[in-house]
Amino acid sequence: MVSGSVGANGTGEVLRIRRLDAGLPLPVRAHAADAGVDLHAAVDCELAPGHRVLMPTGVAIALPVGYVGLVHPRSGLAARAGLSIVNAPGTVDAGYRGEIKVNLINLDPAEPVRIARGDRIAQLLVQRVELWDVVEVDDLDETDRGEGGHGSTGGHHRLS
């Protein structure tokens, strides 16, 4: 993010992107108020059911310290084709300057997914993050919940 000049979104923040493949469009928002920009597939691919691929996107970004890029699945591809991201959301750390790659998986049990070069395959969201120091302690503060997790509050008959 670069402060100073007002970008089209009016916030004064811009995302610095390096295009690694001149034949692909730059990531942009589908609508002005959308949270994420669309990432594009750099190569053609047919993904068999249950298979995954590390898809290049042809772009690299420069995030300042205190920001993270989160790579999310596109909801339409997930709903219509079963295409998702193995490690959703994928994480692009502020210090990373390499090509963004998306670890896609075909969750459809029967149909392959065909991805064409240039297809929008994921969304990149940029968010502020808190950078905490890690400190080892002997005890943690007590809470009402305690160590209850993984369905301990109920809500589903199979978890009771």
Image (tube, rainbow, N blue to C red):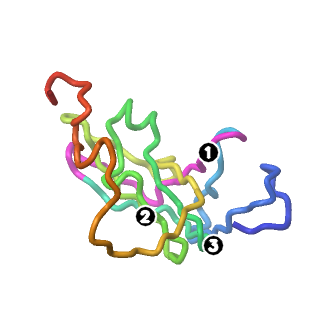
Give the residue drawn at x 14%, y 26%.
Answer: 158
Whichever of labels 2 and 1 marks the residue nearer the N terminus, that label is: 1
Give the residue drawn at x 72%, y 41%.
Answer: 32
- Residue labelled with disc 1: 35
Give the residue drawn at x 40%, y 74%.
Answer: 134
Which quarter of the figure is the C terminus placed in? top left
Q: Is residue 42 magenta?
A: yes
* Disc 3 residue crowd, few under 14, some 14–19, many 20+, Cα 10 Å: some
Q: Main secondary structure of the magenta part?
A: loop
Q: Position of residue 159 (x, y in %)?
A: 16, 30
**Number of numbered discs visible in the structure rendering:** 3
Report the span colored magenta: 32-51
Q: Are marks 2 and 3 in contact (CB under 8 Å)?
A: no
The label shown at residue 14 is none
* Towards the viewer: 121 or 22: 121
Whichever of labels 1 and 3 marks the residue nearer the N terminus, that label is: 1
Residue type marked 3? Pro
In the image, residue 90 above or below residue 66: above
Which quarter of the figure is the N terminus placed in? bottom right
- Residue labelled with disc 3: 64
Specify whether 18 is left or right of 145. Answer: right
Under circle 2, the secondary element is strand
Q: Compute the Cα span from label 2 to label 1.
A: 20 Å
Q: Are marks 1 and 3 in contact (CB under 8 Å)?
A: no
- Residue labelled with disc 2: 101
Residue type marked 1? Ala
Residue type marked 2? Lys
Specify whether 137 is left or right of 73. Answer: left
* Disc 2 residue crowd, few under 14, some 14–19, many 20+, Cα 10 Å: many
